Amino acid sequence: MMQPVKWSTPTSVALVQLVERAPADQLTLGWLIDHLEKRSYGFLLLILSLLGLVPGISSIIGFVIAIPAAELMLGRETPSLPQFLARRSLSTPKFAASIHRLVPVFRAMEMIVRPRFHLPFRVTNEIVGLLVFLLAITLFAPFPFNIIPTLVIMLISFSYLQEDGVFLCISFLAAILSLSFTHALLREAFRATGFLHHLWGQS
């Protein structure tokens, strides 16, 4: 039986190890969860955000990300997924290609994103869960800018994994800016279609 990825392993190394252990053709979200350690929220959210960069599946990934984000926010110790999502298959070559493109970036980030300025564990979990949940919801919107909240989720997850309170605070600010941007886009879209006037009975 294959051993799960060790939490103490650098994130970039752990991602490469995960790709090396993956089935040749396809993998499932359930397989990913089974091969992560108990403290796997940050790692799972990071992997799901990486999958969100694969063209055509950002809306689906947004729904999937929202589930562990809500569980983290509510204080559950380990993430879980409904069976119909856990059995969903993904292309291993596409997943591996996304990982290998980003590993050099993660290696460079690991030189500056390191354990420091620890925030209270419970408060951190609640804030991370809430912001990632809200960002995941914005992925449902049919906008060409979904890569922005996806990248912010990736930054939050990486900072959470590295236990870097400084970068977590920076990523929280990025999340607020991303949510504000999406809110502004939605307001303009509704205003352009007259949806808000119809909804509120205004002329």
Image (spheres, rainbow, N blue to C red):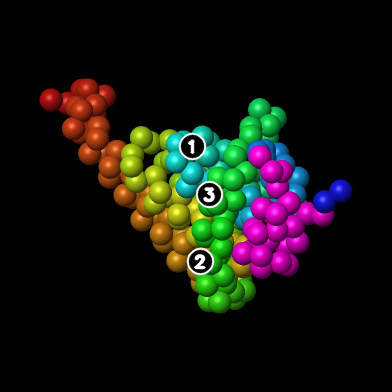
Decide: is 12 above or below 136.
below
Real-space CA distance between mark 2 and mark 3, rounded to the nearest whole angstrom: 15 Å
N-terminal of the pair, mark 1 or mark 2, is 1
N-terminal of the pair, mark 2 or mark 3, is 3
* Residue that appears at 46% across and 62% down: 171
Q: Which mark is residue 57?
A: 1
Q: Position of residue 83 (x, y in %)?
A: 70, 30
**Stretch in magenta:** 3-25
Q: Position of residue 115 (x, y in %)?
A: 62, 74
Number of marks present in the image shown: 3
* Amino acid marked by disc 2: Val
In front of the other: 106 or 155: 106
* Amino acid marked by disc 1: Ile
Q: Which mark is residue 49?
A: 3
The mark closer to the camera, 2 or 3, is 2
Real-space CA distance between mark 3 and mark 1, rounded to the nearest whole angstrom: 11 Å
* Residue located beneath label 2 in the image: 105
Q: Which mark is residue 117?
A: none
Q: Position of residue 1 (x, y in %)?
A: 86, 48
* Amino acid marked by disc 3: Ser
In front of the other: 13 or 125: 13
Real-space CA distance between mark 1 and mark 2, rounded to the nearest whole angstrom: 23 Å
The mark closer to the camera, 3 or 1, is 1
The answer to whether residue 165 of the structure is visible from this angle is no
